[in-house]
């Protein structure tokens, strides 16, 4: 596979690219307009960061330390760099070929503050010091699946260790009804963090179609009111589930551990295409 195999020019947006891997759409990016996030789930992660930041009393352009588990086109890293200049970001992306393709066809700007490490998420996070990051974003796939090593209680505990007090964990999952796998991941996160919430389209939670589920978690309370308003007022409205509502949805699901964690259902990513 050559570098160009990973990036497909967007025929409808000059200068923009669709990043693909293993036959699945990974991300969309426009280097000239880094604040434009086309994937709905990325927009929702951005909502989480904005609402969490404001609740934490930080200025909208405050410098953050962000760790990205999974890189692809680094769309969210570019968004952070544009909205919060001088932020220090580490992207853990073990696929050096896709990183090379991005650097060749859609390079990062000078002094972006984004450093890419060719490490898998488990290895990269374990090497980080305590309380290093303000935000950890988990958006990683291997052969169309979220790796089992990134959804266990042990990994979530390591992510909590790396986060500063009151820091934010944002997770992208892909699954389909009845979401048994995702319910176990949410139960895992809830067992480790004091506050957990889920952003998703209500119809997607009931229908047998593949969808993104975005999880936010912290040791401090989440900005429930802000996220509820933002979700309801979106172009494609979604819901923010938390507390008892989220517990009812998980329905007593058992947290994953390293001993029994499984990757996400293999069909999910391949069925979800940005081009529809």
Image (tube, helix red, strand yellow):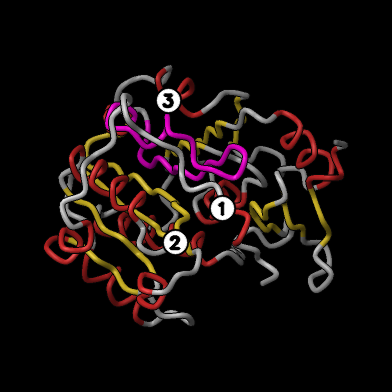
Q: Marks 1 and 3: which is nearer the front? A: 1
Answer few, some or many: residues within 10 Å of disc 1's Cα (few below 14, many 20 plus, some between 14 and 19).
Answer: some
Residue 162: tell me if it is visible. no
Q: Residue at x 45, y 42 (%)?
A: 138
SS class of the residue under badge 1? loop
User: Toward the viewer: 31 or 59?
Assistant: 31
228 vs 89, left or right, is: left
Q: Residue at x 38, y 60 (%)?
A: 50
Determine which residue is flagged by label 2: 176
Report if the CB atoms under discs 2 and 1 are less than 8 Å apart. Answer: yes
Which label's residue is closer to the chain start, 2 or 1? Answer: 2
Q: Residue at x 29, y 42 (%)?
A: 167
Q: Which mark is residue 156?
A: none
| Distance between mark 3 and mark 2 Cα atoms | 28 Å
Answer few, some or many: residues within 10 Å of disc 3's Cα (few below 14, many 20 plus, some between 14 and 19).
Answer: many
Q: Residue at x 64, y 51 (%)?
A: 26
SS class of the residue under badge 3? helix
Residue 154: tell me if it is visible. yes
Image quadrant where residue 191 sits: top left
Which residues lie in the magenta part? 133-155
Which label's residue is closer to the chain start, 3 or 2? Answer: 3
Q: Position of residue 116 (x, y in %)?
A: 62, 30
Determine which residue is flagged by label 1: 267
SS class of the residue under badge 2? loop
Determine which residue is flagged by label 3: 125
Which label's residue is closer to the chain start, 1 or 3? Answer: 3
| Distance between mark 1 and mark 3 Cα atoms | 27 Å
């Amino acid at each position: 596979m050559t570098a160009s195999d990973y990036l497909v020019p967007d025929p409808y947006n000059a200068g923009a690219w669709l990043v693909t891997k293993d036959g699945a759409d990974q991300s969309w990016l426009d280097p000239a307009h880094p604040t434009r996030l086309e994937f709905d789930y990325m927009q929702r992660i951005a909502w989480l960061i904005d609402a969490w930041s404001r609740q934490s009393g930080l200025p909208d352009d405050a410098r953050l330390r962000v760790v990205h588990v999974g890189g692809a086109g680094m769309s969210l890293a570019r968004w952070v760099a544009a909205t919060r200049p001088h932020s220090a970001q580490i992207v853990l992306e073990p696929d050096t070929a896709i990183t090379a393709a991005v650097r060749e066809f859609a390079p990062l700007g000078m002094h972006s503050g984004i450093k890419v490490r060719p490490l898998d998420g488990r290895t990269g996070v374990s090497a980080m010091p305590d309380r290093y990051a303000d935000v950890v974003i988990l958006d990683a796939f291997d052969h169309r699946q979220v790796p089992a090593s990134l959804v266990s209680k042990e990994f979530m505990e390591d992510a909590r260790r790396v986060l500063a007090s009151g820091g934010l964990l944002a997770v992208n999952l892909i699954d389909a009804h009845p979401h048994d796998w995702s319910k176990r991941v949410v139960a895992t996160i809830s067992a480790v963090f004091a506050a957990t919430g889920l952003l998703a389209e209500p119809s997607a939670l009931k229908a047998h179609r593949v969808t993104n589920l975005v999880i936010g978690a912290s040791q401090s309370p989440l900005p429930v009111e802000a996220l509820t308003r933002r979700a309801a007022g979106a172009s494609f409205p979604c819901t923010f589930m938390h507390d008892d509502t989220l517990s009812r949805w998980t329905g007593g699901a058992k947290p994953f551990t390293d001993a029994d964690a499984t990757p996400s259902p293999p069909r999910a990513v391949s069925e979800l295409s940005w081009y529809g």
